[in-house]
Image: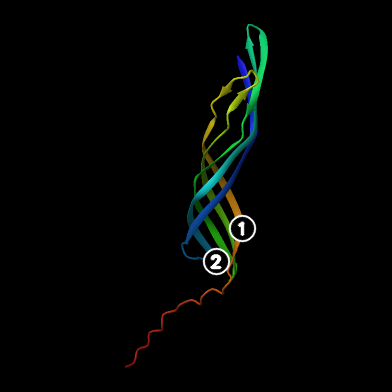
């Protein structure tokens, strides 16, 4: 029986170009959806591995370190949420974001016993985020457009 522990750090720097669609405003509330595409630079660093193997009642420790590596991958996101008009120029937003970061790969695995092994591949890196924020409109909102009144002359 073997018990293994692996630990390390994952960091990602993400750049996305986003677009949003508002679906109108009712009682000051504006629902919206959005999507984004770009790239993520995923970094795996500081990884180490320790293991204890027990065979016939004898426990043997082992371990090693895993080299640092980074990989740039396509990233994309989907958004949905609600905005609330606090003032004509300020909207409070509550939104959800699904973010797909792609994948990443570690460096070479180096065993204390002197052997090296292939890197580990980490697939399906994603994030689910709840966001609270605001939009500040730099220009005043346009005035509402009203149809001219119907006038009948006899």
Q: Residue at x 51, y 75 (%)?
A: 142
Instruction: Say if 93 sits above or below 150 in the image.
Output: above
The x and y percentages for residue 103 are 51, 38
Disc 2 packing (10 Å; few <14; some 14–19; many ≥20): few
Q: Image quadrant for the C terminus?
A: bottom left
Residue 50 visible, this orientation? no
> In the rendering, at what x and y percent does residue 145 appear?
45, 77
Pick out the residue farthest to the left. Answer: 154
Mark 2 in CB contact with mark 1 (< 8 angstroms): no
Judged left or right of residue 131, residue 123 is left
Give coordinates of residue 4: x percent, y percent: 62, 22
Q: Secondary structure at mark 1?
A: strand
**Residue at coordinates 63% horizontally, 6% vertically from top-left?**
56
Identify the mark at residue 133; answer none if there is no mark: 1
Count neighbours of disc 1 (C-alpha within 10 A) and say few if under 14, some if 14 to 19, many if 20 or more: few
Q: Is residue 55 left or right of residue 150?
A: right
* Residue 98, placed above or below residue 32: above
Quadrant containing the N terminus is top right
Alpha carbon distance from label 2 to label 1: 16 Å
Q: Would you place residue 147 above or below residue 39 in this image?
A: below
Secondary element under disc 2, as helix, strand or loop, is: loop
Q: Is residue 136 above or below residue 126?
A: below
Chain-order first, disc 2 or disc 1: 2
> Is residue 30 in view?
yes
Residue annotated with mark 2: 28
């Amino acid at each position: 029986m073997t018990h293994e522990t692996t630990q390390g750090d994952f960091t990602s720097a993400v750049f996305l170009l986003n677009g949003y669609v508002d679906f109108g405003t009712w009682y000051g509330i504006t629902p919206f959806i959005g999507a984004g595409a770009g790239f993520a630079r995923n970094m795996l660093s500081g990884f180490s591995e320790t293991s204890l193997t027990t065979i016939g009642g004898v426990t043997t420790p082992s371990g090693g370190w895993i080299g640092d590596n980074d990989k740039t991958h396509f990233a994309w996101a989907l958004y949905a949420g609600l905005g609330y008009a606090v003032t004509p120029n300020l909207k409070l937003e509550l939104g959800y974001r699904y973010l797909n970061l792609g994948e990443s790969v570690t460096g070479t695995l180096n065993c204390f016993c002197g052997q090296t092994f292939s890197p580990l591949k980490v697939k399906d890196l994603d994030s689910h985020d709840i966001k609270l924020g605001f939009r500040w409109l730099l220009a005043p909102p346009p005035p509402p457009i009203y149809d001219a009144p119907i006038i009948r002359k006899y």
